[in-house]
Amino acid sequence: MCGIVGYIGDKPVLPLLINGLKRLEYRGYDSAGVAMIDQDKIWYKKRKGKIAELEVEINGFDLTSSVGLGHTRWATHGEPSEKNAHPHFDTEHKIALVHNGIIENYAQLKETLKAEGHVFASDTDSEVLVHLIAMCYDGDMAFSIRKALQLVRGTFGILVLSTHEPDKLFAARRGSPLVIGIGENETLVASDGSALVEHTRDVIYLEDNEMAVVNKHGAKVRTLQDTKVEKAVEKLPYDLVHLQKGGYPHFMLKEIFEQPETVWDSMRGRLLVEEGNAKLGGLQSCIDRMIHSSRLILTACGTSWHAALIGEYLIEKFAKIPVEVEYASEFRYRDPIISRVDTVLAITQSGETADTLAAVREAKQKGALALGMCNVVGSTIARETHAGVYLHAGPEIGVASTKAFTSQVATLALIALALGRMNQLSAEEGREIAQALKQLPDQIRQILEQASHIEKIAAKFMHHNHALYLGRGFNYPVALEGALKMKEISYIHAEGYPAAEMKHGPIALIDDQMPVIFIAVKDSVYEKVISNIEEVKARGGWVIAVVSEGDKACAKLCDEVIEIPYTIQSLMPVLTVIPFQLLAYYTAVMKGCDVDQPRNLAKSVTVE
Ligand code: F6R
């Protein structure tokens, strides 16, 4: 949510900032701005809309400055507009600031500052920060920033530049990530590594309540209480090629097509096919505590929450440990009953989702074992949990999550298998599951070969305004995920339900204008789903179904079918979701939607 980038070195900063902002644009894209020191003054440009519009605006400016910062915004306080775009400035225009996060007490602070003569130019909460720093300024920028931040309630990742100390940048965080890239005679700061990787892979992650004073030779980090902190330089786990479209028209399509490899990357070295078991290095130290937990609580948001629902079915089936699934946003505020005998597993692609992070902190506070399942290496949740497991799916840039979901389900299956083998699952059952897991990448490949068939279905689907997605058992969460994918990128209203729930209400919606999308694969609930399809057909609904390879009987009943290969019932979601990702993708493209950056959304929801 919002992207920050800053640079200090020897190169002209403007093109570097624009390039960095483009890499971060997936985090927020309603307005953008840059500021830099130019001849003892702060030069800036802001623009409503995408980075490309800002780029047009600055075209022709040939500035030699080599220190600056930029921001791409996802609006929280104040509409998307030029005045609300970052950077923000103090009244004397000597300090520029960009901010990610939310300042909760901004209204009171703003009143106080106004009374002291500070003039505000925007409706944002962020602007109070720069005025506070100016108010606290006493000749030492680092001191003033620390002092100002003591007055603030809320979350922030900030980057500041000032004509008072023009050869430095100042970065501080509480709740919103910042990472510092250490190059040769150049230092960069960004809200995620994707803006750094083409310059350096050597990075320092700032922790909460830390502040860095940055110059072109590196960064000095102290706490906001002014205690020195020694930071380790770590390596970013990917390079530039992972951040490019690789010949695909959109990141989302690239990421859908990467899934045979990314699902395997999540299992590589962990799946023990011969033994019928799994070994997850990151969880090894706490697997005994997990198995003896009174229950596992899986907590997450959005697509990751759908993966958690499948995780519940998997762990209960294989390991016979009671599992509960909670929206992180509910978990954090409803004062849940958790104790030392519980394990809480937070599932999050970004590792930065504010609600999921708060749920982790709540679980730790109450003594539970707090585990993380993240994709982004070094992310806040990965670092704050007691232990965890990475997805190894590589950077996911498309705002709609695809490859992270299938990797989450595959990794949850590995956890369920490992726990199951310590509990009641026989070696033979373990081997059957492991064999099925091993086949998933090839089976995904087989489904991807039907992309053009699915594209043709999308050409008919795109004319509808509503859709119902129905599935049962392990495929019920896939129905939810299919509907979410469709609505977030094509803006077609879609709802997912357990198929049997249809007759308790949604059936009222069905007429010949209503597409109903079923998952009707050959599993233990197949017959029941077929009855549900009959009920829809009897009311004139247009039925698209994901069916098992060669199921002619079901095909006869439906208007459109997409066939998928056979796997065991518990792993079906990894396959059944693929047609839904493609259907959403092609529908959105045909409708002319911005697939990688859908309206109002942002990757990584770091505010509540
Ligand atoms: C949907 C989507 C979101 C995220 C949700 C949680 O396509 O991407 O629903 O799944 O915001 O994000 P993470 O997994 O980063 O915690």
Image: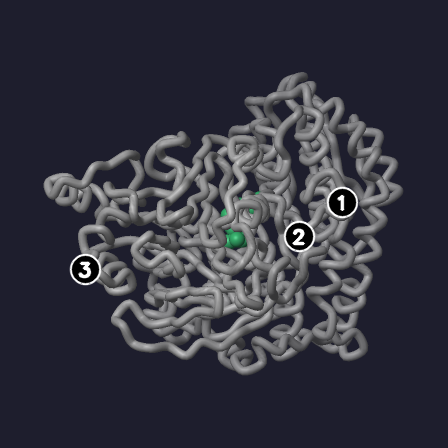
User: Which numbered disc, 1 or 2, marks the residue that appears first in the sequence?
Assistant: 2
Looking at the image, residue 122 sits to the left or right of residue 589; the answer is left
Per the model, the C-alpha gap separating discs 1 and 2 is 35 Å
Secondary structure under tag 2 reads helix
The crowd level at tag 2 (other Cα within 10 Å; few <14, some 14-19, many 20+) is some
Marks 1 and 3 in Cβ contact (< 8 Å): no
Residue matched to label 1: 521
Label 3 belongs to which residue? 138
Whether tag 1 and tag 2 are in contact, CB under 8 A, the answer is no
- For residue 581, side relative to residue 347 (left or right): right
Residue 536 appears at what percent x and percent y?
67, 26
Question: If you read the primary sequence from the N terminus, does the residue marked by circle 2 or circle 3 appear first?
Answer: 3
Q: Mark 3 and ligand 1: say if the CB distance to the nearest ligand atom is below 8 Å.
A: no
Q: CA distance from mark 1 to mark 3?
A: 69 Å
N-terminal-most mark, 1 or 3 = 3
The label nearer to you, 2 versus 3, is: 3
Q: Are marks 2 and 3 in contact (CB under 8 Å)?
A: no
